[in-house]
Amino acid sequence: MADDTSSRSNRSSGGVAAPVRMPVSLTVNGVAADLEVDTRTTLLDALRETMKLTGTKKGCDHGQCGACTVLVGGRRLNSCLTLAVMHDGDEITTIEGLGTPDNLHPMQAAFIKHDGYQCGYCTPGQICSAVAVLSEIDAGVPSHVSETLDAQPKATSEELRERMSGNICRCGAYANIMDAIREVAGGRP
């Protein structure tokens, strides 16, 4: 039997393969961060556990609730479904990067004004998603309920509900969340 030293060098003393670690460079909320993470680490866990940015929540850990939504390159993403190493060089915005207590993002201010939260657990993901929803509409990206694929979508209630459907609020603050998004959308029809 051939001696396989390469497989032995990746094993811990208990015979179990040691985790593979890899460097990853991210720009998070405008700040450069160089991390070394286990290649199995999700972006969510890198943000929460390594960078201590706990505003992004871990809900279902299956991409179904949206509590972990962050913006990557301006696009919304469920951070529990992607590995940190896949985002080397990416610009990431979490709820902490949208605004500060003294200078809230308009969507954060609207959520407060319209009481768009109850327990607040899903709120960071809801706000990040809502910011991206309005950017998608402004960019002309159609959804499943858009009237046509080539016309500029409008921020209608039906359009906003469809686009926000990946963010679940178990407390049921949906009406207030919609009011907040509509306000930031500028009262568009």
Image (cartoon, rainbow, N blue to C red):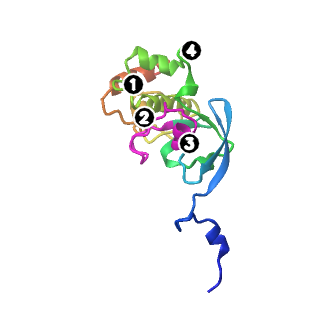
Q: Which mark, residue 178?
A: 1
Instruction: Give the residue displayed 55% in from the left and 54% down from the top.
Output: 40
Sequence-earlier tag: 1 or 2:
2
* CA separation in Å, label 1 and label 4: 22 Å
**Please, what is the three-letter code of the amino acid marked with disc 3?**
Ala
Q: Residue furthest bottom?
A: 1
Q: Are marks 1 and 3 in contact (CB under 8 Å)?
A: no
Sequence-earlier tag: 3 or 2:
3
Of badges 1 and 4, nearer the viewer stands 4
Q: Dot 2 corresponds to which residue?
A: 164
What's drawn in magenta, residue-wise? Answer: 44-69
Task: Classify mark 1: helix, strand or loop.
Answer: helix
**Please, what is the three-letter code of the amino acid marked with disc 2?**
Met
Q: Dot 4 corresponds to which residue?
A: 103
Compared across the picture, whether 31 is left or right of 182 comes to right
Sequence-earlier tag: 1 or 4:
4
Task: Classify mark 4: helix, strand or loop.
Answer: loop
Foreground pick, 176 / 96: 96
Q: Are marks 1 and 2 in contact (CB under 8 Å)?
A: yes
